[in-house]
Image: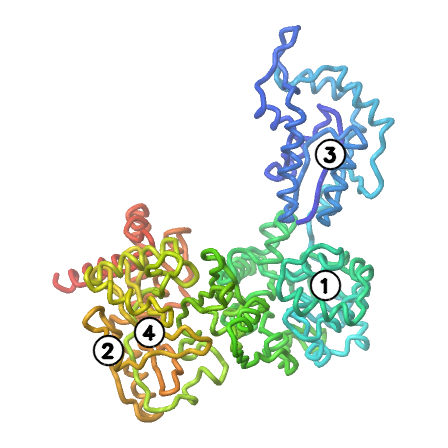
Amino acid sequence: MKTLLLFRGAPGAGKSTLIKRWGIKGFALSPDEMRTLYESPNIGVDGQLSIGFHSDKKVWETIYKIAESRFARGEFTVIDATNSQTHEILQWKNLAKKYGYRIYLCDMTDVPIEECKRRNNGRTQVKRVPEEAIEKMYARFATQPVPSGVTIIKPDEIRNLLWKCESVDKFDAVNIIGDVHGCMTALNELRNFDEDVNELYIFVGDLCDRGIENAEVVKFFIEHAYNPNFIFLEGNHEKHLRAWANDKSVFSKEFNLHTAPQLAKAGIKKKDLRKALQKLQQCFWFSFRGEEYFVSHGGIPVDPKSVNPLFIPTCDFINGVGEYEDVYDVDRNFSMEATDRYDIERERINQVHGHRNPETADIDHIPNTYNLEASVEFGGHLRALRLDREYGKRVDNIKNEVYRIPEEIKVETVEKFVNQLQSSSYIAKKSVAPDLYSFNFTSQAFRHGIWDGVITKARGLFINTTKNRIVARSYDKFFNLGEMENESVTLRNMKYPVKAYLKENGFLGILAWDDANDDLMFCSKSKANGPYADMFKQAFLQTIDEGAVDAFREFLKDGKHTMVFEVIHENDPHIIKYEGNKVVLLDIVSNEIEFKRIPYDTLYRNWLAYVPIKRCIMGNIRDEHDLHGFIEKISKAKGIEGVVLEDTDNFMVKVKTDYYNSWKMLRRYTAEVVKTGRCRTGGLKTDEEMKFYEWMRTRNIQDHAALKQDFNGGNIIKLRDMFNDEKQGKILD
């Protein structure tokens, strides 16, 4: 956490000993240890060895650099130095202020000078300092005071820095509120905050951005930040507020395009916001009616009884431990630890957080944990956990009806299209070549389901922004069946007859014409170079006869079309087994803003002689009844990824097989076992999954190195073949 602990005392005062006693050695930076790295012990005129001080400038520059790196992550930091001079402490104070740190100084200057000399003389030769150095330090202690704003503590008071569980039983109820994200209407619907003065309100962070009522929420924050019954935790979006309030650059398209103008228009005073932001906390650990709760923005995998919050970096509270998608594993690990502790100590501890919930799981889907993130800013729900003295626990889910509805944007010119692409905070722009850029939707768009008429087109899209010409494009974004709640991705909108095409298990390859080099351009989703583009080119040349390549050049050189392929390559981990590298031509797409493609019959007739074409496995699904029957049947198929359903309006949706989904999950589980030796088993449903998991886990115990080698690069196919061979062998025996 954002806490800096300094020591002040002469050599021999017991600083290092105290650090070891409190178990904080791993958090300490020591100039003496750094000195031994920069130079070997020096020999003096008296023949004694001592630590060298010739590199002190470099030593302190390095320590400050390391400390600032730690401060940027919000790590608890200890400085094991004498800090005898005021200016030394001032330097640390200024650095702490820059990063919002609490700063404490453990004063050990009351240790008698004679005791320090005695301890110094008892040290090994190399650690001993001249007695006159100790005398000089004591003279400085007397004349150079500790600057104001630094909290002075005694050695026994270090224990007070450790975070403790705080009782809030004085309140009638506790309300823990999830990410608000600029949705004031939903917040007002949740509670009348001004009336409930005997209730505690804890906000998990991310007050602004993405919603359309950011100014109202920020005003609410400023008005309530100093109320004793309000606690605001810091989320990852608060950094944008802090930067804006301090007139610093904000590195967020969303904030700059939407939030900042709202705040400015509403007349939000930056001075007031700066003061309110000082009240943000990193986490809150409390007890209420016999149960403990640990609240942070992102969630952690351990309970605070096993690892004190002081020792956890602030960035882990804000962003959550691990990657965004790891949230359920984090919660499971917390739950297991909390359950074990509950069994032993008869105390119950719960975790509450927001920030991440990619699959929109239920608020309490894992025991002892509550996930308050539910995409309120996109028309989802504002979640809150209410703990009431009289009525117990209650979960509130407030549907948000006031949000920015994605527009079906239609633009007539490429120039306007480029402007729309560049103005979206959910689209990433990358330079591919001079004047050539790729545009692709970000992970945020995917996680939160933001799909307007521009974002859906930002997928494998390459545009020459000087000539305002689309050089290459693939499909508009389309989804797996059941992946999105939006009506547009359900089966109801399909126009019959519907066709089903085999979904190959590879990655997307985009083939277009490169004007600059007057040749074919091989692209992955966002690059015209790099490993995936290289794999695409290699697989293409291995699939296409050398003499036939000219046919592709001749067709593409007018720049009017893009060829979209599925690329199967041995260096790209698959779930489905293939023999060798190959490409499959999926479609030929017009280089226009609106998605258009050559009819399948034409594609098949003109290009089958040159390259494998996607395979139509059902060409006339007549109605919804037939469609549901086909989906049920294909879901049970073995050895394929699934199908792509296409209707007469170019609407597309993917249907994955149970076989593919099962082995994709088992690949993730195997990767975890290989990496950590342990894994969750909650997702295992079938006997086959359980048998493979036990087989794989047993192999890991017997020979971890062999399993790691067999699984190299995520090779689940090799492990699956080995598993099936062994299983078949047992049957034959």
| Residue contact between numbered discs 4 and 3, judged by CB atoms under 8 Å | no
Label 1 SS: strand
Label located before the other in sequence (4 or 3): 3
| Residue at mark 3 | 7
Q: CA distance from mark 1 to mark 3?
A: 31 Å
Q: 567 or 345: which is nearer to us? A: 567
Near mark 4 (Cα within 10 A), the count class, few <14, some 14-19 or many ≥20, is many
Which residue type carries mark 2?
Answer: Tyr
Residue 497 visible? The answer is yes
Residue 123 to residue 571: above or below:
above
Horizontal and vertical percent position of residue 566:
31, 67
| Residue at mark 2 | 604
Query: Which dot, 3 or 2, sits closer to the camera?
Result: 2
Near mark 1 (Cα within 10 A), the count class, few <14, some 14-19 or many ≥20, is many
- Residue shown at 28%/70% (left/top)? 585
Looking at the image, what colour scheme do you see? rainbow
| Residue at mark 4 | 588
Label 4 SS: strand
